[in-house]
């Protein structure tokens, strides 16, 4: 399956959307709240417009599932579906701590096969496509990335805005094998594991497909493990886009916490 065109267009759109986000980031902006009480800003909307317009123009036969678009369930009849989070980490964007991302993924027959994650504040780009490996790109260079080999003194990622008591208890029970807990926002946590800068991330609270799809592809192509908490595979382009089982990311299965 040749995904070079899909990957190149997704990278271009993620960067373009990120540039639009940063123009708003450096200015003042209003904050609205959706029905689920999650925040949304003009940056979410502008990024979404750029990505959706670009994908629809370049790939008119593909479906799109985006956090900021009305869901069209006709996508269930399409083997190819882009999954988009135009601004992952809106809370971090509002706090202006730089830990927010643009996420674009492609699912084929319910499996994620492409992932692009861009960090607008630092201009870092992570990307992967099935069978091609995972990569980290800055203005200076591009490098292939892989998970670490650590099975001792492991480093655990924790969400900046969504840490739960269940996760804290898990870390406490396994503290004898953990050397450090790193805190970060958005899908950056999965990227850091793919890059070998941490080994474990557990998420018990609810997420949606657009929160995990791009991150999963990058982690897996970097040699890592991405599973639902019950050890089953995470599928995409589902009727219910809620990830209600939670998930974990590991560099190696030996680091599965109990």
Image: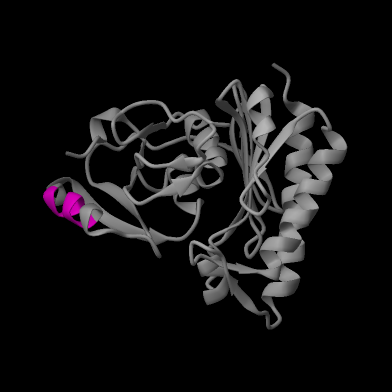
User: Quick one: 121 or 162, which is closer to the camera?
Assistant: 162
- Up/down of 106 relative to 17, above or below: above
Q: Main secondary structure of the magenta part?
A: helix
Q: Is residue 256 left or right of residue 89?
A: left
- Up/down of 66 relative to 223, above or below: below
Q: Which x, y percent locates residue 24?
A: 72, 73
- Residue found farthest to the right: 57
Q: Is residue 174 magenta?
A: no
Asked whether the viewer can see residue 146, the reply is yes
Q: Is residue 170 magenta?
A: yes
Query: What is the quadrant of the C terminus in the image?
Result: top left
User: Quick one: 40 or 7, which is closer to the camera?
Assistant: 40
Q: Which x, y percent locates residue 240?
A: 50, 37
Q: Quadrant of residue 121?
A: bottom right
User: Quick one: 29 or 196, which is closer to the camera?
Assistant: 29
Q: Which x, y percent locates residue 2?
A: 73, 19
Residue depicted at 31% across the width and 50% down the height:
156
Query: What is the quadrant of the N terminus in the image?
Result: top right
Q: Quadrant of residue 94?
A: bottom right
Asked whether the viewer can see residue 96, the reply is no
Residue depicted at 43% across the width and 41% down the height:
243
Q: Which x, y percent locates residue 224?
A: 42, 32
Q: How many marks do you count on the picture?
A: 0
Q: Is residue 255 left or right of residue 14?
A: left
Q: Is residue 230 left or right of residue 57?
A: left
Residue interval drawn in magenta: 168-173
Residue depicted at 12% across the width and 49% down the height:
173
Q: Is residue 61 left or right of residue 207?
A: right
């Amino acid at each position: 399956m040749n995904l070079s065109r899909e990957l190149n267009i997704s990278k271009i759109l993620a960067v373009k959307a990120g540039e639009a986000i940063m123009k708003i980031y450096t200015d003042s902006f209003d904050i609205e709240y959706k029905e689920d009480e999650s925040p949304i800003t003009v940056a979410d909307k502008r990024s979404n417009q750029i990505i959706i317009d670009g994908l629809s123009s370049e790939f008119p036969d593909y479906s799109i599932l985006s956090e900021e678009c009305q869901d069209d369930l006709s996508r269930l009849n399409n083997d190819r579906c882009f999954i988009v989070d135009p601004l992952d980490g809106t809370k971090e964007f509002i706090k202006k701590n730089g830990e927010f991302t643009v996420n674009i993924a492609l699912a084929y027959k319910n499996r994620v096969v492409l992932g692009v994650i861009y960090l607008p504040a630092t201009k870092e780009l992570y990307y992967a496509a099935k069978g091609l490996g995972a990569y980290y790109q800055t203005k200076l260079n591009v490098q292939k990335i892989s998970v670490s080999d650590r099975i001792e003194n492991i480093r655990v990622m924790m969400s900046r805005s969504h840490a739960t008591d269940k996760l804290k208890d898990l870390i406490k029970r396994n503290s004898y094998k953990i050397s450090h807990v790193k805190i970060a926002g958005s899908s950056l946590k999965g990227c850091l594991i793919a890059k070998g800068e941490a080994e474990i991330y557990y998420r018990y609270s609810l997420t949606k497909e657009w929160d995990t799809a791009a991150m999963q592809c990058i982690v897996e192509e970097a040699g890592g493990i991405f599973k639902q908490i019950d050890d089953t595979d995470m599928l995409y382009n589902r009727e219910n886009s809620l990830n209600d089982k939670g998930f974990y990311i590991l560099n190696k299965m030996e680091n599965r916490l109990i």
